[in-house]
Amino acid sequence: MHVAESLEEVCALLADDPSASLLAGGTDFMVEVNYSHRRPRSVIAIDRVPELTGWRQSNGHIELGAAMTYAEMEHPLFAAYVPALAQAARTVGSPQIRNAGTLGGNLATASPAGDTLPPLAALGARVRICSRRGSREASIDELIVGPKKTTLAPDEVIVSVRVPALDGPQEFLKVGTRNAMVISVATVALILDRTQRSVRVALGSVAPVPVRAAEAERWIAEVVDWDAPAVPADDILVRFGELVAAASSPIDDHRSTADYRRHAVAVMASRALARVLS
Amino acid sequence: MSEDRSIAAEQATLSYTLRVNGTDRPVADAWLGESLLYVLRERLGLPGTKNACDQGECGSCTVLADGLPVCSCMMLAAAAVGREIVTVEGLADDGELTDLQQAFVDHGAVQCGFCTPGLIVASEHLLSVNRSPTELEIREAISGNLCRCTGYGRVIAAISAAAEARTAAD
């Protein structure tokens, strides 16, 4: 058991024993341990490593430490810069879980239902990953390649995530069975980028990995009157919803059906678009 | 040979000291994978923190870690070294009730009582950061604490009453 105090120490410990488990908030890890699905032999706690904590703003970007908790992402000062991520964090688990679970943990677990993943994908986030061999950067789709599958090597640790501070409103919408303590059935992150004159949309829980709705993004960018943005007519909203839903590839499972997920994604995409343009 | 080593490693134990309710509490020869909840209840004789779901869903194991409510079942005990842990037992002297606990009694906010310690810890934290919470803020603060008896109405009444009494007393 190591409670790591620096990034260098984490990288050295992982290099010596790549089979060691990294522990941040514990909200995924401990479920597996408590239910005997995992028997940890060696654990490196990384939640107090200074390089992994907090967030900072620089040159039009926000750098988020991997050990930043959902509760920290909900904070109004942070929410002002990356509202979609703050809204997503707000929907995770309970206050107790949000005080423990981390951004880096959401990425490394790589669940299709990870709520921070669609906002990060829509923002074009860059993930910084370190090991004693060096440092590299990855986009969300380079990092997450399948349900609970990442390209992280056993000796690597996620250090931070960089997202742009964009000019324009952002929305995160989620469908679940109720408001509190719910794993998402379908999610939509939608971001208006006034500078680039683009709409960025990403979906969660409706494909093996978070997906961007590229065709819908291209279509709506041509339709919006960027000099005088206004809520589009109903037929535009519906068409946009259909194009977004077409980017999903949901499955039937114990939480929902594929048909419902496609429907929910279309409705949420239309609603999110109307909100950011109102 | 390597299998023997891994079995030995699995069974290896460790000793550490936790800070619980203002006191240093040594934990000896514990398994690495033990949750803080398990260690509190089974090793440190603090059964006030309840164990129900063991997966962060029910809130009955809520404790404060460095002042924030967390599920103790989701915290690896050996990784809680250096954190200030407060359990329901740490809120009042032995045999006494806090004003909030008394409000739960007065308002009939306790039925089977299993969720009560978690609710008390979560709502005590709420009142420490928000002296006059609205009903919505109370509901939000206890949204991670499942109660299958009360329907929450009396729990919310008790928390409101405790908040009002504290504000009035200032």
Image: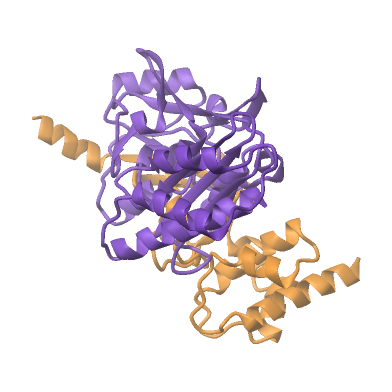
| Residue farthest along the top direction in this orientation | A133
The quadrant where residue A39 appears: top left
Residue at 89 percent across and 70 percent down: it is: B169
Residue sitting nearer the eye, B48 or A122: A122
Q: Against B167, is A20 above or below?
A: above
The quadrant where residue B5 appears: top left
User: How far across and how far down the image is residue B148, in percent?
Assistant: 48, 80
Q: Which chain is orange?
A: B
User: How far across and how far down the image is residue B76, in percent?
Assistant: 42, 46
Residue at 51 percent across and 58 percent down: it is: A235
Q: Is residue A233 visible?
A: yes
Q: Against B119, is A127 above or below?
A: above
Q: Is residue B84 visible?
A: no
Q: Against A196, is A255 above or below?
A: below
Residue sitting nearer the eye, A206 or A184: A206
Whether residue A216 sits left or right of residue A166 in the image: it is: left
Q: How is the image coloured?
A: by chain
Q: Against A67, is B68 above or below?
A: below
Q: How many marks?
A: 0
Whether residue A147 sits left or right of residue B116 in the image: it is: left
Residue at 64 percent across and 38 percent down: it is: A226
Q: Which chain is purple?
A: A
Whether residue B164 sits left or right of residue A155 in the image: it is: right
The quadrant where residue B132 appears: bottom right
User: How far across and how far down the image is residue A197, in percent?
Assistant: 59, 33
- Image quarter in which the N terminus of chain A is found: top left
Residue at 64 percent across and 34 percent down: it is: A194
User: How far across and how far down the image is residue B88, in percent?
Assistant: 59, 64
